[in-house]
Amino acid sequence: MIIKNANVITCDDQKRIIPNSIIFIGNDGRIESISDSKSTDINPAQANEAYDAHGQYLMPASICAHTHFYGAFSRGMYIPGEAPDAFPAILEKLWWKLDKSLDEKANYFSAMVCIIDAIKHGTTSLIDHHASPNSIPGSLDVIARAIEESGIRASLCYEVTDRDGNERTQQGLEENLRFIENLRDQKENRLSALFGLHASLTLSDATLTKARELCPQNTGFHIHAAEHVVDEYDSIKKSGKRVIQRLNDFGILGEKTVVAHGVHIDAKEIGLLAESGTWLSHQPRSNMNNAVGLPPIESMINAGVKVCLGNYGFSNSMWQEWNAAYLAHKLINSDPRRMPADLIYQMAIINNRELIKTLFYGLEIGVIKPGAVADLVLVDYKPFTDLNSDNLPWHIVFGFRESMVTSTIVNGKFIMKDRGLTTLDEEIIINEARNISASVWNKYQALF
Ligand SMILES: [Zn+2]
């Protein structure tokens, strides 16, 4: 396929923006070349498909380092009784009852509605963290089916926890292991797996030991840490150690492990994340919504922690997360110099794509250059000021909107073309999701 008349935002090492280009994508889904539109090197007749971008921007699709497809049906849901006064109450009243209300069908459709949202808003690689305590065995296969059908890319895991009794702890451990082993034989490169753990505060020493024993050495973990300060106090009470130290001592950290949040970690814990090469995913919208505070992201990056950007399932527009990060750190520090947009670029573009490369078989995703995988979006953005390599991150924060995404490409194939989904029937899925979400809401209300 060729895409012509595109203004290409490469996100390569030189951060080149190449106007009026032709990009050639091979049948293997990899970018073969980028040329000037007047170039005679490329003969459009050689391509089996030629798409005219009409001057839109073509750029790498967004990547999300931490999300929860299972939370989709919380949208608009009534939470009975008094409003939760802090994050532990939000867990008890919302998430730990919503997850118990999910069955196989609900797992599938809550994933599907998030996937549609992601495709329409230009996010094509997501790292999901799943929970459905009343439907654990096979739950990752159900979500994998939604990933396969949609054409999107995702890393999946099941969050192991001790909060629902031994049997479910065991089921969670087995579900991770089963899914990781099944993926070994897959030829498809759009699925990968991590070993999911909920958080230190719901995991005993025995369960952490078992998880470490079961998880293959070449697979990482995906876990929440110090999202609220109770996680730190719980860890100190259980072990005399802070959360990251406790996880490190059980062998949970490492170059393939993703830790979400880290809002309340101290300098020593930051050092442990940096030394172990562990990824830290930042979700500012979620942190603000749960009123848990904000992690010291700039200090973490200065200390050498590989900080990525996730969305917690809030919405799958990563540019909204950019915007929240840009604003939140300025407000909390009362300093407009904090969290410049190029630091967000470092997290959301550079670090997120390095994480995806680590989890997805060494694939180069998230950059436009020969040899990289063509996971791309077309953006109908018409800047009224100069857009260049230096100010791109600020244009993304202040100018780019998810509604400007008109086409989404994964592995060189359109999964949304001119705003029409090519792999999924949105109307059928949304109608079915509305029916299923009604029964999820009924089950949820019955738990009070
Ligand atoms: Zn999370």
Image (cartoon, helix red, strand yellow):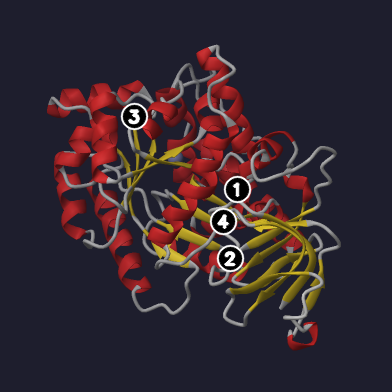
How crowded pointer 2 is (Cα within 10 Å; few <14, some 14-19, many 20+) is rated as many
C-alpha span from label 3 to label 1: 33 Å
| Marker disc for residue 439 | 1
- Where does residue 244 sit, x and y in percent of width and height? 25, 34
Instruction: Identify which amino acid the numbered label 3 is placed on.
Output: Ala
Instruction: Confirm or deny contact between disc 3 and disc 2 (CB under 8 A).
Output: no
Is the residue indicated by label 3 positioned so its CB lies within 8 Å of ligand 1?
no
Along the line of sight, the residue nearer the viewer: 163 or 27: 27
Q: Which mark is nearer the camera, 3 or 2?
A: 2
Does the rendering let one see residue 445?
no
| Marker disc for residue 226 | 3
What residue do we see at 32% from left, 49% from top? 257
Disc 1 or 4, which lies upstream in sequence? 4
Vertical placement of residue 115 versus 144, above or below: above
What residue do we see at 57% from left, 16% from top? 331
Instruction: Identify which amino acid the numbered label 1 is placed on.
Output: Ser
- Where does residue 350 sit, x and y in percent of width and height? 49, 49
Q: Disc 4 designates what residue?
A: 12
Instruction: Identify which amino acid the numbered label 2 is placed on.
Output: Lys
Disc 3 or 1, which lies upstream in sequence? 3
How crowded pointer 4 is (Cα within 10 Å; few <14, some 14-19, many 20+) is rated as some
